[in-house]
Image (cartoon, grey):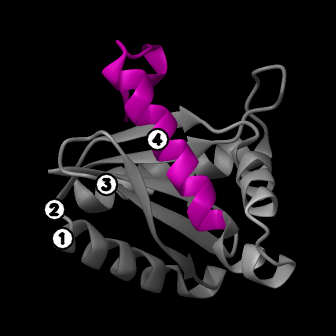
Amino acid sequence: MRIMGLDYGTKTVGVAISDALGLTAQGIETIHYAQHKRHELFQRLAALIEAYEVDRLVVGLPKNMNGTVGERGEDCLAFACQLRKRFDIPVVMSDERLSTMEAERRLIEADVSRGKRKKVIDKMAAVLILQNYLDRTRNGGTDHDKPYS
């Protein structure tokens, strides 16, 4: 079984998947969706969950720098709740402060053009979210690793 990491946004969702041993995260894709067609987002996620035999989802939780949860974070919590109800598998929230900025920095260091960065930034952020989760849980975990309900 594998773990799927998600970087949830208002128009895109970056998707990453763990290897079978839960050691490394690899980017799969960025799902583009329209708010009025969210069912298409959930259909694509269902297909990926089945194809990769996913038994846990990790959703990035964008917190403010002071640790509070703002409007964007509330949207991610609501999304996580919808995922749990639809797929009946554990959903874990993972602090994703600065993950998109880190993804951008790594892509710039790799000399990826601005146009190409825009296409892969969400997928790369999902990789960072999932890899951070995998590293934390392998090293004892934290209270943030408890399933969200």
What residue would you read off at disc 4?
131
Q: Amino acid at mark 4?
A: Gln
Give the x, y percent position of residue 116: 74, 81
Q: Which residue shows up at 76% across the image and 24% down it?
A: 68
Label 2 residue SS: loop
**Marks 2 and 4, how far apart at CA:** 18 Å
**Marks 4 and 3, how far apart at CA:** 25 Å
Answer left or right for 79 relative to 45: right
Q: Amino acid at mark 1?
A: Glu
Label ID, residue 50? 1
Looking at the image, is mark 1 or mark 3 nearer the viewer?
A: 1
Is 139 one of the magenta-colored residues? yes
What residue would you read off at disc 3?
85
Magenta range is 122-149
Is the residue under label 2 in contact with that under label 1 (CB below 8 Å)?
yes
**First in sequence: mark 4 vs mark 3:** 3
* 149, 45: nearer the viewer: 45
Quadrant for residue 28, please give it.
Answer: bottom left
What residue would you read off at disc 2?
53
